[in-house]
Amino acid sequence: LGALLVWILPLLAVCAWMVLDAANRPAELIAFGLVVVLAAGHLVIMPLMRYRLHRWEITPDVLYVQSGWFTRTRAIVGRDSIRAVEMHAGPLAQVFGLKTVVVRTDSGPARTVRIDGLGPSASAHVRDELTPAV
């Protein structure tokens, strides 16, 4: 849905151009087709690539998180360096009941590791598993 929202403005702009200026119909049709093809490609490829490239795992000793599209980021955080575990949800994520788990560590200045798009049970499990015992 996030990818769809990215393409609404370009699609509306091309549609407005087609309505307001009928003199350039061939160029308008090419622009419309280009926007539709790019949007469809993005809507199909983006979820597949996100699934393929983003990973996380919790072991007894470390949290491992991999993310990124063009430059891959891999973080390995020792469980003993975890200082806080927070959960966030933006407006779109709230509609679908998804959360982002943010793990703050004491290694480096303000180091954070994020796990995006977790459902309610998975986010609660990650939070409970990683919350430092007090």
Image (cartoon, helix red, strand yellow):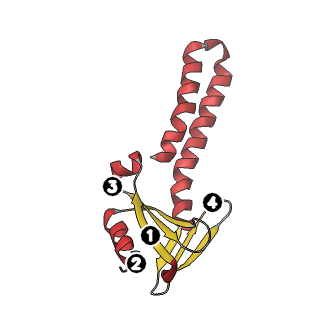
Numbered badge on residue 132: 2
Mark 1 vs 4: CB contact within 8 A: no
Mark in the foreground, 2 or 4 = 2
Q: Amino acid at mark 3?
A: Gly
Side of 97 relative to 37 (left or right): left
Residue type, numbered disc 4:
Trp
Q: Are marks 3 and 2 in contact (CB under 8 Å)?
A: no
CB contact under 8 Å: marks 1 and 3: no
Q: Nearer the viewer, residue 35 or 118?
A: 118
Q: Are marks 1 and 2 in contact (CB under 8 Å)?
A: yes
Question: Which three-letter amino acid code belongs to the residue tagged 2?
Answer: Pro
Q: Is residue 130 left or right of residue 34?
A: left
Position of residue 103 relative to residue 45, above or below, is: below
Question: How many angstroms separate mark 1 from mark 4 (CA)?
Answer: 27 Å
Element on which disc 3 rests: loop
Q: Secondary structure at mark 1?
A: strand
Q: Quadrant for residue 91, please give it.
A: top left
Q: Quadrant of the C terminus?
A: bottom left
Q: Which residue is mark 3?
A: 97
Label 4: which residue?
69
Quote the CA–CA distance across marks 3 and 4.
24 Å
Q: Secondary structure at mark 2?
A: loop
**Residue found at x 61% / y 42%:** 38
Numbered mark located on residue 84 in the image? 1
